Amino acid sequence: MTGIVTQFENTKLSHMELSDQVVVDSDTTAYDTVLAMAEADTSCAFVMSGAEIVGIFTEHDVTHRVVRSPDVWEQPVENFMTSNPKVVTGAASALDGLRLMTEGRFRNLPVILEDGNANLTHYDLIHLASDYLKSDHEETHEFNAEYALKYVDFYGMPSRVPLEVEADESLFNTIELMIKADRGLISVVDLRGILIGEFTQHDVFRKVACRVDDLNDVPVGDYMTTSNMATALPTWSIADGLHEMSKKRHRYLIVVNETGRTVGVVTFRDIADYFQAAFVTD
């Protein structure tokens, strides 16, 4: 078993610094829930019935079910949440969490702790992987997941074809593209195809949802993120990419060439899938 997999297996969720979430009752409106998430800058809300987590409401739900329909903003969040989510206790390991999230294709996993609830996210797993790879530990020269993370570059792993729009494209068309492709990130480029910004599901719930009534009326350039983007050259190692994602707190990495044009997009899920044999079944 490789070192990084052992690290994931030996790290209990109760010992990790997990992500925050907001907590709302099931009859809280979608509008109030989105604003609470934006104020707390967290991409997930736990929906409660008493002390029980009956659902989670995430930036994915906001993008796919709420942002385009102002007429539903005052409806209860339970109408749009993901019901009966998987839940684990703090005794579960990071590897257990990664397995569940990889197999279920979700990015938020509620964790029941002795002193309350917390949320395991891809951000937390990125931090764990990045911190381990930066630490002083004995290395092996066998070709395994850890070796590949450090020495395989982004030419050597599959990446997603980037979805691109120009800054004057409408929010409506940009979000429609995001939904139809089931992507969480759209690259915003200039007339020469050079990356000038990004528009993500995080931007949707923080800046747009329950604020902008007519998505056709405003360009995406007014709401895109232009600073603190996580980017990498194709020659970077996957470990370098994980460090960049950890530093910028992104689960997406935009791979750009020397001219600043986007050549691919990599997510933490892509990296986990690439090393599935080591991370999940080793």
Image: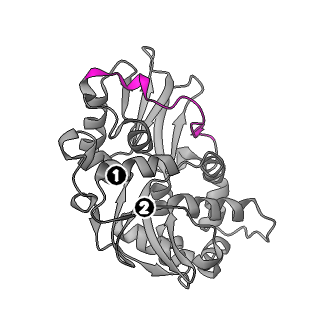
The Cα–Cα distance between marks 2 and 1, rounded to whole angstroms, is 10 Å
**261 relative to 249, above or below:** above
Q: Label 2 sits on what residue type?
A: Arg
Q: Which residue is mark 2?
A: 107
Q: Position of residue 130 (x, y in %)?
A: 66, 59
**Residue at x 63% of width, y 67% of height:** 17
Q: Nearer the viewer, residue 248 or 80?
A: 80
Quadrant of res 218? top left
Residue 133 shows in the view? yes
Q: Which residue is mark 1?
A: 60
The magenta segment is: 217-235
Q: Is residue 233 left or right of residue 177?
A: right
Which of the marked residues, 2 or 1, is nearer the chain's N terminus?
Answer: 1
Q: Label 1 sits on what residue type?
A: His
Residue 69 shows in the view? no
Find the residue positioned furthest to the top: 191
